[in-house]
Image (cartoon, rainbow, N blue to C red):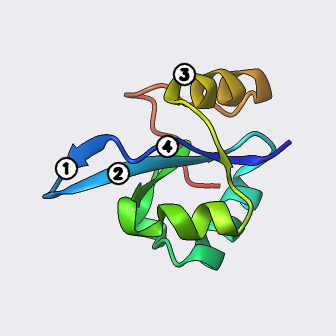
């Protein structure tokens, strides 16, 4: 059970981005994101969009590096995956 982050390989707004997820709970994810300075507005359905500038801080804080497919697999296995178009209330 962990917080995971994929490599910053997603372009947007002139930056590269990672996805930060928890395979335990949204509470764990929100707490971890706050510890590394990721703003709450970065939360999108079931993950945080994290700029490349925060990637090293996330890993130092204990996020496990994983590929994007592994993040999705772990979210789904934990029952935390929220499909696009079905935006649920933030937990």
Query: How crowded is the residue under tag 2: few (<14 C-alpha within 10 Å), some, or many (20+)?
Result: many
Query: How crowded is the residue under tag 3: few (<14 C-alpha within 10 Å), some, or many (20+)?
Result: few
Q: Nearer the viewer, residue 18 or 88?
A: 18
SS category of the residue bearing label 3:
helix
The reply to whether callout 1 and callout 4 are in contact (CB within 8 Å) is no
What separation in Å lies between label 3 and label 2 (alpha carbons)?
A: 15 Å
Residue at which label 4 appears? 45
What separation in Å lies between label 3 and label 1 (alpha carbons)?
A: 20 Å
Q: Can residue 30 be seen in the rendering of this structure? A: no
The reply to whether callout 3 and callout 2 are in contact (CB within 8 Å) is no
Q: Earlier in the sequence, mark 4 or mark 2?
A: 2
What separation in Å lies between label 3 and label 4 (alpha carbons)?
A: 17 Å
Q: Nearer the viewer, residue 65 or 36?
A: 65
Residue occupying the point 41% across, 61% down? 42
Q: Earlier in the sequence, mark 1 or mark 4?
A: 1
Q: Looking at the rendering, which quadrant does residue 91 occupy?
A: bottom right
Mark number for residue 17? 2
Residue at which label 1 appears? 12
Q: Earlier in the sequence, mark 3 or mark 2?
A: 2
Q: Position of residue 10 (x, y in %)?
A: 30, 41
């Amino acid at each position: 059970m962990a917080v995971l982050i994929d490599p910053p390989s997603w372009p947007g707004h002139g930056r590269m981005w990672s996805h930060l997820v928890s395979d335990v709970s949204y509470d764990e994810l929100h707490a971890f994101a706050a510890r590394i300075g990721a703003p709450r507005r970065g939360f999108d359905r079931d993950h945080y969009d994290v700029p490349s500038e925060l990637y090293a801080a996330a890993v130092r804080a204990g996020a496990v590096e994983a590929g994007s497919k592994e993040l999705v697999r772990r979210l789904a296995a934990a029952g935390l995956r929220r499909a696009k178009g079905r935006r649920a209330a933030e937990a």
